[in-house]
Image (tube, rainbow, N blue to C red):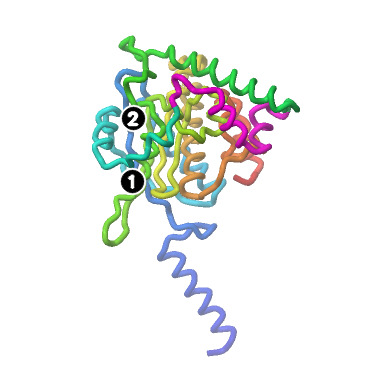
Amino acid sequence: MRPKKLFLFLIAFFAVIVSDYGLTQNNYPPFIYDVYVLTDNNNKALPDKDIKEAIENAQEVISKIFGATLSTPNIYQYPYKQYFDMRLGEKIDSNIEKYRINIFNINPPVLKKMISSYKSPAFIYAFKGEVPKSDKVRYNSLIGTYRNTFAALQEIKDISGKHVITEENHYYSLAYINAMLYMDTNWDKSFNWTPKIYITNHIIIDDEIDMPVHTLIRGGLANGLSSLQSRSMIVSYYGLLNDEYIQKDNNDLVRFNRNKILGALIVHEFGHAAMKMPDEFLDNGSVMYPVWRFNYWEWFDNLTRHVTQGGAP
């Protein structure tokens, strides 16, 4: 075969290969996920159409910034606590308590040790660039922020009037949710499983000993969690529903933006679970930059400008 014909043949051959395997422009195969919507009926919840819209928003952003495809998922509905109880019936690592902290009575040395492990970008993020030079000032400031914010979260009640975060239940526990995500591999002989995107309106509180800085300054409130083992992830939109501005549900623009923000939170966890990207603490336009405190709108505005300008993930 002549060189020119051979060259054309190879181009055609690889085009067929790419087409057959459905590779995207960045050579990622389509990411296939199931979506499990876990609803706590004792809290405000988004309607199905809003969840679907948020997923579609996530698919669009994933395509734009990662050059990847999130396939249209199957969507399943479960009551949050019923699903939580069902999964807790599975075999959970008996050592899980070793990785938990008593969030209702954290000893100052535990918090100080946690904060001492943070790297410089974490402090730049936490203090928005105005980092105190004194270790003592940094520690006391972050510990104070955590304690005051967690105290406020403890006052949260559901629509039935009961406190959401109590020592008597684990429904909020990130440690237990982490164990559930880890077990999502569902190993079989062919090593096949479909990872899951859990979307819930239930609050998630970090109670692990390695709480990251962005969660600490929210008093432990987590917007989501991902597992590199199973590639599953969970996103909580509790914070979105309880934002004072977002409560104006009769405003179509608010609803539109809220669903966009939920989609972006899904993309953030997708970046961890599927793309194996770490949190980014210096570039506030990156989708991997965690929401600072509860400033969802500022976070989304920065992300939107970043994506519009063609910035990196």
Tell me which residue sits at (30%, 54%) in the image. Answer: 187
Q: Nearer the viewer, residue 289 or 68?
A: 289
- Determine whether 175 is above or below 29 in the image: above
Location of residue 51 (image quadrant): top left
Q: Nearer the viewer, residue 161 or 75?
A: 161
Residue 16 position within the rendered picture, expressed as x and y whole percent measured from the top left: 44, 70
Tell me which residue sits at (44%, 69%) in the image. Answer: 17
**Label 2 or label 1, whichever comes before in sequence order:** 2
Residue ID for mark 2: 48
Dot 1 falls on a residue whose secondary structure is helix
Residue 244 position within the rendered picture, expressed as x and y whole percent measured from the top left: 50, 14
Q: Is residue 306 visible?
A: yes
Q: CA distance from mark 2 to mark 1?
A: 24 Å
Which disc number belongs to residue 184? 1
Residue 181 position within the rendered picture, expressed as x and y whole percent measured from the top left: 37, 42
Specify start and end residues of the magenta stretch as a single range.
102-129
Residue type at tag 1: Asp
